[in-house]
Image: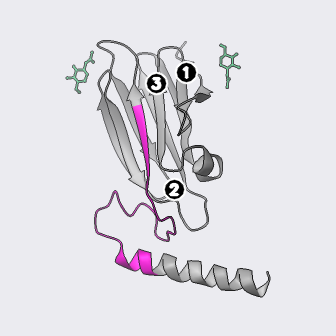
Amino acid sequence: MGIGKQALFFTMLLIALVEAAMSTTDSKDKVDKFVISPTKTIVRIYNKLGEGLNLTIHCKSKDDDLGVSTVAYNSYFYWKFRVNFLGTTLFFCGLSWRDASGVFDMYKAKRDMKRCPTRCNWEAQKDLVQGLRQGDNVHDMAFNWTYKT
Ligand SMILES: *[C@@H]1O[C@H](CO)[C@@H](O)[C@H](O)[C@H]1NC(C)=O
Ligand SMILES: *[C@@H]1O[C@H](CO)[C@@H](O)[C@H](O)[C@H]1NC(C)=O
């Protein structure tokens, strides 16, 4: 590591420590302990399954359990966080409806920091779960449901 990079590293570390010290007591805000991102990222999972179909969502990271939510058709579940200092932030969610389910990585810093820096939207549809890229809203990711036999 060159001297310039080292100085940058320690400056960023200092910012992270100051931010951590100033972080509020709102538990949904301090999802990670050491943070450098100037902006928060919001992830939304929309229920686009169809009229009368509920979607059950249970998201977690290594340190946080966001609990179980039931989301009605055309509504969404969301959470906000800052990408952690090491860029290792990962949230995975168990989604289920009727006899379909799946556990998917729904925010992964290495994958998503560029594709959706502040707004990451997902749509749970009957045939698959689709991810939308921020900016042009192109459906650039898809996960399949697993069905109970
Ligand atoms: C959907 O969820 C709501 C709220 O939890 C519940 O009242 C309703 O009965 C559910 N509908 C179905 C079809 O399961
Ligand atoms: C999802 O299912 C489709 C067709 O059923 C298949 O072509 C595709 O490869 C599957 N994707 C994954 C990630 O398994």
Count of numbered circles in the view: 3
Calculate the distance from the C-alpha at mark 2 to the C-alpha at mark 1: 23 Å
- Work out whether mark 2 precedes mark 1 in sequence or the reverse, and give the earlier one: 2
Give me the residue at 53% from left, 64% from top.
84
- Left-right relation of 112 to 78: right
The front one of 146 and 118 is 118
The front one of 78 and 137 is 137
Calculate the distance from the C-alpha at mark 1 to the C-alpha at mark 3: 10 Å
Query: Residue 124 placed where, x, y %?
Result: 46, 24
Task: Give, as a single range, the part of the protein colored magenta.
Answer: 18-45
Q: Disc 1 beta carbon < 8 A from ligand 2?
A: no
The front one of 19 and 147 is 19
Calculate the distance from the C-alpha at mark 3 to the C-alpha at mark 2: 23 Å
Q: Is residue 46 magenta?
A: no
Q: Pointer 3: what residue?
A: 124
Q: Is residue 24 magenta?
A: yes
- Could you tell me which quadrant the C terminus lies in? top right
Amino acid type, mark 3? Ala
Dividing the image into four quarters, tell me where ligand 2 lies.
top right
Q: Pointer 1: what residue?
A: 145
State whether residue 48 is above or below residue 10: above
Judged from this view, the residue extending furthest toward the right is: 2
Q: Residues within 10 Å of mark 2 (few under 14, many from 20)?
A: few
Q: Pointer 2: what residue?
A: 62
SS under mark 3: strand
SS under mark 2: loop
Overall secondary structure of the magenta stretch? loop
SS under mark 1: loop
Amino acid type, mark 1? Trp
